[in-house]
Image (tube, rainbow, N blue to C red):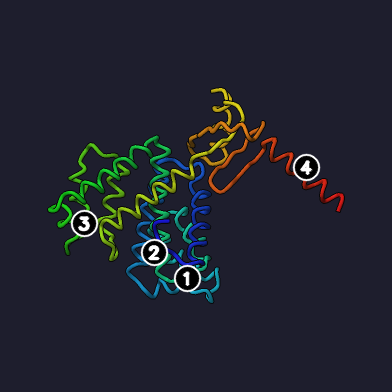
Amino acid sequence: MRIHLGGSSRQSLVASRVALDAAIKGASAASASELSSHLFFAADVFASNTSLRRAITDPSRDKGAKAALVKDLFGKSTGTLAISLLSDVSALRWSATKDVIHVIEQLAIEAEASAANIAGELDRVEDEFFETSRLVADNFELRKALVSVGSTDAKSALIAEVLGRKASTSTIKLASALVAHLRGRSIEAAFADYIFGLANRRNRLIAVVRTATALTDAQTSRLATVLEKKVGQPIRINVQIDSSILGGVSIKFADELVDGSVVNRLANAGRALVGQSA
């Protein structure tokens, strides 16, 4: 992973992504993008206030009290999706208080990636964002302007002007958030963190299907429809032909593995027979 988190925080990042999956299931691109904006705002609030950050990550504090604090902090400035997701995040355990900032930022990036995916532009955003990172790295004057002491609004406006009308709305939004909130990172490290978030969301929206024989277009379409209904947004099907599984289909999707291959069924049957004879 790009961001380096300790044991509890690493587990909390995984749990937070599952909560994000639930929050954006069936959401429109606009709703997912709005959630992203609210999460960026929340990350900034916790980054700028140590006391609030400690309160929200204190393991001795009751989960209900933390949820109430989230509602008090963001009830008038964010939507119900963000409040619910932040309440879930506040209930998790952290190796260090600052880790919650990084995790909320990652959720914000991935929420915007989901907005792009729903709009059919995730591949475009990934490409544009990588190109933007190279543009900044290769242009000394631009990089200097973006990392120098100055107004964050001016930096966001500058990167938006540089990207102009050619870049997607999601790319401009993410780049603007990045330059406004480096939080002690080099701009190269910040780009790496954002690219990591985009890639992670894409990987969670790919179903890897292993089958002994090629699927027909109709079968692939039906499978995509079933999975998209489960996830609530478009996914990509990657089919791998693997004669070693003999027959059936094995599907790896996000953190789930549905293994209906003949080899797996035979293995299960063998284990059952061993159990019965024991």
Tell me which amino acid carries mark 4: Ala
Of tags 3 and 4, the one toward the viewer is 4
Residue 95 image label: 1
- The answer to whether residue 154 is visible is no
N-terminal label among 2 and 1: 1
Q: Which of marks 4 and 1 is nearer the N terminus?
A: 1
Residue 207 in percent (x, y) is at: 53, 38
Tell me the quadrant of the picture where the N terminus can be found. Answer: bottom left
Q: Mark 2 points at which residue?
A: 101
| Residue at the image point whose x is 37% and y is 62% from the top | 43
Disc 2 versus disc 1: nearer the observer: 1
The Cα–Cα distance between marks 2 and 3, rounded to whole angstroms, is 20 Å
In front here: 210 or 216?
210
Q: Position of residue 239 (x, y in %)?
A: 53, 32
Is 235 situated left or right of 198 in this image? Answer: right
Mark 1: amino acid = Ser
* CB contact under 8 Å: marks 2 and 1: no
Distance in Å between CA atoms under marks 3 and 4: 63 Å
Residue 85's place in the image compared with 169, above or below, is below
Rounded to the nearest whole Å, what is the CA distance between mark 2 and mark 1? 12 Å
Residue nearest the observer in this picture, 179 or 6: 6
Sequence-first tag of 2 and 4: 2
| Residue at mark 3 | 153
The residue tagged with tag 1: helix, strand or loop? Answer: loop
Q: Is mark 4 on a helix, strand or loop?
A: helix
Give the image location of residue 255, x and y in percent.
56, 49
Is 168 or 123 nearer to us in this picture? 123
